[in-house]
Image (cartoon, rainbow, N blue to C red):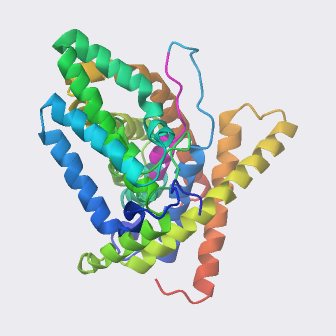
Amino acid sequence: MDSTMTRGLATKDIVYIALFAALTAALGLMPPIHFAGAALPPISAQSLGVMLAGAVLGAKRGGLALLLFIGLVAVGLPLLSGGRGGMGVLLGTSGGFLLAWPLCAFIIGYFVQKDATANTLKLGLYVAFGGIVVMYAAGIPWMAFVGKLGMSKVLTIMVAYIPGDLVKVVLATIVARGLRRAYPNL
Amino acid sequence: MLDLYSPGKSILHRMTPGPKMLLMMASATALFINESLPLTAAALIATLLLYRVAGLPLKTALAQVRPLLWIFVLFFAIQWYFSGLELAAYVVLRLAALILLASLVTLTTRASDMIDTMTRALTLLKPLGVNPDKVSLAISLALRFIPVLGRISAEVREAQKVRGLERSVIAVAMPMAIRAIKIADDVSDAIDSRGYRS
């Protein structure tokens, strides 16, 4: 993990950044999963890309991968789930969640790099912190602001999404752990 | 390139992306500073008139807000219940105007022009260590990787179906991730062996 020390990015780093930006886009092509019938909103697999980028690539490259992804959405490519994209979605009600993605990946990566020997449970906690706590901490105030709503009301709306996000945390942790075993010097 | 651009020859289409973005940002800020319902309604009508100017049908404008319909209804209901009809109308109209305005920039600007403007703007960040050439390389690689990942996913799914594992998420995700990294390594070696200096 000496890539954070070197100032420039090697070719390999650029390719990995592009790969995880593309992975996040490709996850948006998967149909949303309904796992609790109509009781809970369907989950899109896309924020799995955020968690994986952070947990696999580390802070700098993970954050840049998601910055690249959000940049591509901002210029008008329909890369968000459901073929959405453009400035309208980024400034809309869920804009805070989306714009926080680079930061979420960065924070997951930061903890994963700092504690490289973490066991699976700890890895999962880091992923959950960046992928749920940080994301909601950015997305909920944004939604409260654009909707002129109290934070607690928005929080009540968002609680329905937490089970789906927990499923993604488990998945991301298992895949990240496997990838780090297969490629110890990613 | 597949983007959300809607071709046309209007003044909005001909405007350069930079000023268009700044104008949109300024209008969006004004929309949020303003607290009056009539002004917000006027802004929404003005935005819809801009769609006319851009030669876009009302149907296109509706398509921009349709995915958010349930959240509009939810916000309207909560605001109406807790704060009254006027605030509810204000919030929903403001949100609609914001989203329509921002989408208008996307609809009237080619993604390639937007990328050019962005890369040029990044040259300003060169003193901070940002290299626009690397950004361009990352953009083209990412766009190329999306269909590649789609193909890998289809292949892995098929292979796991033979083993009766196509419903196991991990059995599909894990080999997919490993193959993706393998391809990225090969691409990176190929770029380096052709003398790309990063």
Farthest top residue in view: B81
Looking at the image, is A124 positioned above or below residue A102? above
Q: Residue at x 44, y 62 (%)?
A: B109
Q: Is residue A108 shown to the viewer in this render?
A: no
Q: Is residue B7 shown to the viewer in this render?
A: yes
The total number of labels drawn is 0
Residue B85 drawn at (x, y percent)? 21, 15
Question: What residue span does the magenta drawing correspond to?
Answer: A40-53
Quarter of the figure with the N terminus of chain B: bottom right
B37 part of magenta stretch: no
Q: Residue at x 18, y 47 (%)?
A: B29
Residue A60 drawn at (x, y percent)? 36, 61
Residue B35 drawn at (x, y percent)? 12, 33
Q: Residue at x 64, y 79 (%)?
A: B190
Q: Residue at x 31, y 79 (%)?
A: B123
- The foreground one among B169 and B136 is B136
Farthest bottom residue in view: B195
Q: Is residue B9 left or right of residue B37?
A: right
Q: Quadrant of residue A151?
A: top left
Residue A4 drawn at (x, y percent)? 35, 67
- The foreground one among B139 and B65 is B65
- The foreground one among A105 and A44 is A44
A43 part of magenta stretch: yes
Looking at the image, is B132 positioned above or below residue A114? below
